[in-house]
Image (cartoon, helix red, strand yellow):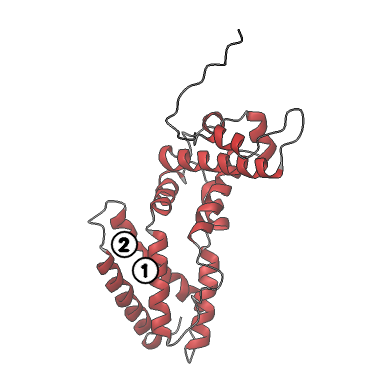
Amino acid sequence: MPTRPATTPNNGLRSTSPTARTREAGGPRRGGRPSRLAAAQLGETILDAATELFLSDGYGVTSIESIAKRAGISKRTFYSRYRDKAALFGAVVHRVVERLRPAADTPLFEGGALEETLVGLARYILRAALTPDALALHRVILAEASRFPELAAIVNEQGGRSEAVDGISTLLQRALDPPPANASFAAAQFLQMVVSLPQRRAHGLGTPMTPTELDVWARDTVTLFLNGVRRGPKI
């Protein structure tokens, strides 16, 4: 009498391992190229594994072998998608940043008075910069950029800072009369003023700020910044 293959009970729960997710998405077709859905899911699985390892263990310790093992892929599959570990780290940074971006129709640099626009922008920047993934990424960069100079280059390229500086610079030139002589410098200083201390405290160098404290911080920082830009020497 034929026997039925043994199965392992799973209490009705579906597996969520990277390999299982790839199979569920219509994994690679036997003897052929994977479907588009499977290829996209595999890409997400690799990025999930890399993000977790980079942000928890650091860049230097994390190897291509450990990423491939966590993602359930071969090194050959890895190299078919990424040139090297630095290229994958760039993809991780890009994804972290993209997930922090506002919706395309969010008017960050538009609205009423300049002060209110900057306060809203400062609050948004703080919410983004103090998320767990953003803090973990910042921690990795601070700890390892001296040993791996490519990390700083990757963050400069993928991190979105230059885009923010350009947006704030344009806003200042449009809203201030006379505009600052060096609006890009002023915009970069604004970003630093908004983020620096709250970020340090979130890293453990002091008590992390509460949401109420962050709101007050955003408004006070904007007031100080505008006082300096409007009344100080032209920069």
Quadrant showing the N terminus = top right
Q: Residue at x 66, y 40 (%)?
A: 38
What amino acid is at disc 2? Pro
Residue 201 in sight in this render: yes
Which residue is denoted by mark 1 in the rendering? 194
**Which is more toward the observer, 231 or 5?**
5
Q: Residue at x 44, y 87 (%)?
A: 112
Return the x and y of residue 135 as percentages of the image width and height. Answer: 39, 52
Q: Is residue 201 left or right of residue 77?
A: left
Return the x and y of residue 180 as percentages of the image width and height. Answer: 48, 84
Residue 96 lies, with reference to residue 106, above or below; the image says above
Give residue 216's quadrant in the image.
Answer: bottom left
Return the x and y of residue 140 as percentages of the image width and height. Answer: 43, 46
- Mark 2: secondary structure: helix
Residue 1 lies, with reference to residue 200, above or below; the image says above
Q: Is residue 27 left or right of residue 107?
A: right
What amino acid is at disc 1? Val
Task: Using the numbered discs, state the Cα–Cα distance from disc 1 to disc 2 in whole angstroms.
Answer: 8 Å
- Mark 1: secondary structure: helix
Extreme-left residue of the structure = 207
Extreme-right residue of the structure = 32
Callout 1–callout 2 Cβ contact below 8 Å: yes
- Categorize mark 2 by other alpha carbons within 10 Å: few (<14), some (14-19), many (20+): many
Extreme-front residue of the structure = 1
Q: Residue at x 38, y 77 (%)?
A: 119
Residue 96 lies, with reference to residue 38, above or below; the image says below
Return the x and y of residue 132 as percentages of the image width and height. Answer: 38, 51
Q: Residue at x 56, y 37 (%)?
A: 21
Residue 181 in sight in this render: no
- Categorize mark 1 by other alpha carbons within 10 Å: few (<14), some (14-19), many (20+): many
Identify the mark at residue 198; answer none if there is no mark.
2
